Amino acid sequence: MAIPEEFFIVRQGRRMVLYAGLLGEAHARGLKGIDTELLQVPVAENGNVAVVKATVEMEEGRTFSGIGDASPENVGRGIVPHIIRMAETRAKARALRDAVNIGVTALEEMGEDDAPTPARETARANVASAAANGDGVPQGPGLSEKQEKKLLHELDRGGYTVGQFEEKNGPIAELTKAKASWFIDRLVETREGKDG
């Protein structure tokens, strides 16, 4: 058994696995349960850092554990109200990686400063493309940093993962400003239609 390639993405040349892929593989291998324990409640005195321990139990009785942390310093602005849940997801991802013997980092484990952003990747790809073409001018305007943040925020609010979006629409880093605006508008319309 192996995690399907659709659950892997590449960011700044680093191959990463998605949490959904880890969970699916663990179920296929006989996941019995996942227990989590909040080790540190985020409060001002500890820098609002949440720390969670996750323990994965497989059917054959083996257990695997992982620690995850999250704070306003290592998550996106839209995730700050959900720091405990992010710490829990990171802890579970680490424990699941050990349980299914996956050595690459899960995307969800990455901190805000560590995680390569689509806008940074676009800039890097544009520079590489310009160098390869020898013209020094990237083709077409890529999405802005502000658009990237808005798109990621709307995907999160709509319950979509970056992996799900990129599987259907291609890498966010390759979106033009016009396409990014179109997707943002559609996500907002869909969400408002659901909420209304």
Image (tube, rainbow, N blue to C red):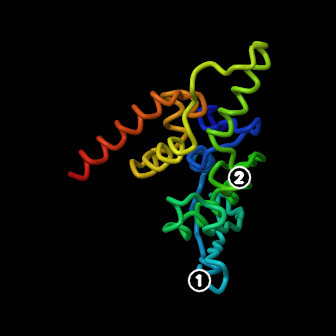
Residue 81 against residue 159 in the figure, above or below:
below
Which residue is at 49% across, 68% downward? Answer: 81
Numbered disc 1: secondary structure: loop
Taking the image as shown, residue 79 lies to the left or right of residue 194, namely right
Above or below for 48 versus 146: below
The numbered dot on residue 62 is none
Say which residue label 2 marks: 97
Question: In this figure, what is the number of numbered marks?
Answer: 2
Whole-percent x and y of residue 56?
64, 62
CA gap, disc 1 and disc 2: 29 Å
What type is the residue that disc 2 sits on? Answer: Arg
Q: Nearer the viewer, mark 1 or mark 2?
A: 1
SS under mark 2:
helix
Identity of the residue drawn at 66% across and 62% down: 74
Please state which of residues 125 and 65 is positioned toward the viewer in this rendering: 125
Which residue appears farthest toward the bottom when viewing the image?
45
Residue at the front extreme, as displayed = 136
Dividing the picture into quarters, in which one does residue 138 lie? top right
Q: Amino acid at mark 1?
A: Val
Residue 101 or 154: which is nearer the viewer?
Answer: 154
Q: Is residue 23 above or below residue 174?
A: below
**In the foreground, 167 or 179:** 179
User: Of the residues under marks 1 and 2, which one precedes in the sequence?
Assistant: 1
Position in image of residue 155 (x %, y %): 45, 45
As drawn, the label of residue 43 is 1
Left or right side of 14 for 75? left
Q: Residue at x 70, y 68 (%)?
A: 67
Residue 1 in view here: no
Q: Is residue 171 visible?
A: yes
Classify residue 125 as left or right of residue 155: right
Q: Residues within 10 Å of mark 2 (few under 14, many from 20)?
A: many
Position of residue 131 measured from the top left corner of the image (x, y, whole percent): 79, 19
